[in-house]
Amino acid sequence: MWSPVERTAALEAEIRALGPVRHIVSPNKLHYLFLGEWQAAFPGASLWATAATIAKCKELHFSRALTDEPPAEWRGQIDHFYFTNSPFMDELIFFHRGSRTAIIADLSQTFSETFLKRHWPWWMRPIAKFSKMVEGWGYPPIDYRISFRNRATARPKIRELIGRHPEHVVVAHGEVVRTGGEPFLRRAFSWLLQ
């Protein structure tokens, strides 16, 4: 289970119908709010997070901190790309080899026009569009980009991710990219690759 949202009985039932939950993962220090309630629902599942999340959630029991090196439990199936370039944010991007899917929490956001109209105030919608946090672009929020330091260390990781030829991109904030993941990521990370 990756970056779990608030637990409801209906959502838990849907997840249980899929099969046993073995791992619960937080990809960065902003995606931690509901880890405890899911850990309580699935006490046999291992809880994983980045070091920044673990430091923030001292009341939870984690297996260990996730880094660029995947744990043995999914090594060879899911690759990690860990970014600590912002003092305000860390991010662990996952790449599932079998389905050629990149899984991104906050380093790419693809809000649809419909979503923006339903959930964002009218005056913030132009900011999302100007910041390219919308479908077709997939940039992260402007404050994340501005605070992103030492970009040269991040470029090889992004190039390696793109070099895996992802077909799909799942994002925590926005629409799933169902085809053309590789060109999408080139565009979404163009701010970093320049």
Image (cartoon, rainbow, N blue to C red):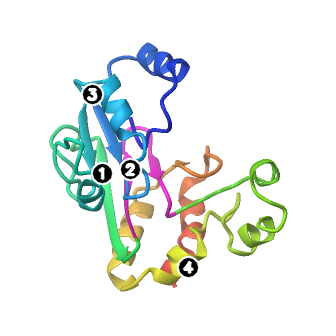
Q: Do the residues labelled 1 and 2 touch (CB within 8 Å)?
A: yes
The disc at residue 95 is: 2
Residue at left 53%, top 71%?
A: 189
Please state the extent of the stretch shown in magenta in the rendering. 89-107
Identify the residue position indicated by label 4 in the image. 191
The residue that label 3 is drawn on is 22
Q: Is mark 4 in CB contact (under 8 Å) with mark 2?
A: no
4 in relation to 84, above or below: above
Q: Please count the marks in the image.
A: 4
Which of pointers 3 and 1 indicates the residue nearer the eye?
3
What mark, if any, has residue 79 been given in the picture? 1
The earlier-in-sequence mark between 3 and 2 is: 3
Image coordinates of residue 38 in percent, x first then y, are 37, 31
141 to 48, vertically: above or below: below
Q: Residue at position x 74%, y 72% from top?
A: 127
- Measured Cα–Cα span from mark 3 to mark 1: 18 Å
